[in-house]
């Protein structure tokens, strides 16, 4: 049970000690932080819920299941160290944010001994009443002075408005059209090279590397398609696939295209070097395929 409770502890700030419970005596000499209050309420709530579940159980020895224990925990508010503990009604089973204690303190600079050092003084003015859900002034405390120098609270922030910007329909049409044109041209050029492969100009241009160029441009052009995909035409999972696909398609297509160019250039370079020495040499595409691989 101790290991489970420690696994549920909140992560403390970097400068604060760990919130994990231990069985050593010096643990109880530590000064509790505000995290400890929430841990106390969690453990106390589990105990209260266990008592309620055992009382409602009709099994021998007041046995109850984990589901029954959890149901009693989230369905019965109780007064704890951090306020009137209640849980939200939705399926998240999270604690209601309005059920914990909040304090409003006024912090003022009272002295500045050096240029880089300031001394502040804080006074708690108000607290949040978790039962009535209103801010209440502490008895005997003076009114809170706001940044404008008055005691009148500022206006509430406007409601948060979420605005989603996706790929518009015209942009999608342009992207799909450009991708279709580029892919069609790559296929058409590959077919033309194959049909004219015996022509002296095409033969001198080395058809195997021309095919590689066409494949590279086709793959690279396909990267335009996932760029135009957003949640208006695909599921979140599909959008994730499209987001990764555009990187892979563009990178692989670029690599194939320029590898073909380098291999083609290497073949020409070897032929010219042998020609200077008046040597006859036959260089096949397999001899210069290493840069491509």
Image: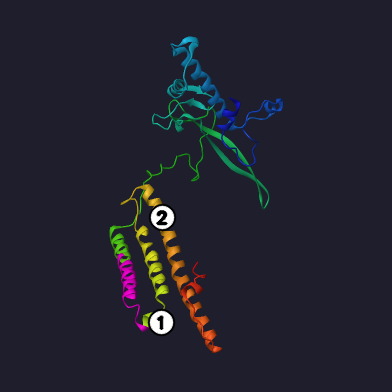
Q: Earlier in the sequence, mark 1 or mark 2?
A: 1
- Closer-to-camera residue (20/109): 20
Image vertical order of residue 98 relative to residue 158, above or below:
above
Q: x, y percentage for residue 63?
A: 48, 14
On the rendered image, what quadrant is the N terminus found in? top right
Q: Element at badge 1?
A: helix
Residue under pointer 1: 204
Q: x, y percentage for residue 90?
A: 39, 31
Coloration of the structure image: rainbow
- Judge from the rendering whether residue 228 lies leftward or rightward of residue 17; answer left or right: left
Residue range of the region highlighted in magenta in the rendering: 180-200
- Closer-to-camera residue (51/226): 226
Extreme residue in the right direction: 26
Image vertical order of residue 281 relative to residue 28, above or below:
below
Residue plotted at (62% across, 39% down): 121
- Mark 1 or mark 2, whichever is nearer to me: 1
Q: Element at badge 2?
A: helix
Residue plotted at (48% across, 12% down): 62
Q: x, y percentage for residue 189?
A: 33, 73
Q: x, y percentage for residue 222?
A: 36, 62
User: What secondary structure is the magenta-colored segment mainly?
Assistant: helix
Q: Residues within 10 Å of mark 1 (few under 14, many from 20)?
A: few
Which labelled disc corresponds to residue 66?
none
- Closer-to-camera residue (95/21): 21
Q: Is residue 13 magenta?
A: no
Answer with the quarter of the image where residue 276 lies: bottom right
Answer with the quarter of the image where residue 204 lies: bottom left
- Judge from the rendering whether residue 13 lies leftward or rightward of residue 287; answer left or right: right
Which labelled disc corresponds to residue 243?
2
Image vertical order of residue 285 relative to residue 137, above or below:
below
Instruction: Tally the marks.
Output: 2
- Label 1 vs label 2: CA separation? 40 Å
């Amino acid at each position: 049970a101790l290991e489970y409770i420690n696994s549920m502890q909140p992560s403390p700030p970097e400068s604060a000690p760990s919130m994990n419970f231990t069985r050593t005596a010096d643990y109880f000499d530590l000064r509790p932080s505000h995290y400890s209050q929430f841990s106390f309420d969690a453990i106390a709530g589990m105990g209260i819920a266990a008592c309620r579940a055992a009382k409602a159980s009709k099994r021998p020895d007041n046995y109850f299941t984990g589901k029954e224990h959890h149901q009693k925990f989230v369905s019965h508010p109780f007064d704890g160290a951090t306020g009137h503990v209640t849980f939200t009604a939705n399926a998240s089973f999270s604690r209601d944010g309005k059920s914990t204690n909040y304090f409003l303190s006024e912090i003022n600079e009272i002295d500045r001994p050096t240029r880089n050092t300031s001394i502040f003084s804080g006074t708690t003015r108000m607290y949040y009443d978790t039962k009535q859900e209103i801010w209440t002034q502490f008895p005997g405390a003076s009114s809170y002075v706001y940044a404008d120098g008055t005691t009148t609270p500022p206006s509430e922030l406007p409601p948060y408005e979420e605005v989603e910007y996706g790929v518009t329909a015209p942009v999608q049409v342009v992207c799909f059209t450009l991708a279709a044109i580029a892919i069609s041209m790559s296929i058409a050029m590959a077919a033309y090279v194959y049909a004219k492969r015996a022509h002296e100009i095409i033969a001198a241009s080395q058809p195997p590397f021309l095919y590689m160029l066409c494949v590279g441009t086709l793959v690279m052009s396909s990267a335009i398609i996932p760029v135009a995909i957003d949640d208006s035409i695909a599921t979140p999972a599909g959008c994730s696939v499209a987001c990764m696909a555009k990187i892979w398609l563009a990178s692989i297509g670029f690599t194939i295209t320029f590898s073909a160019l380098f291999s083609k250039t290497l073949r020409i370079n070897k032929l010219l070097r042998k020609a200077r020495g008046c040597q006859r040499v036959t260089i096949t595409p397999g001899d210069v395929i290493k840069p491509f691989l």
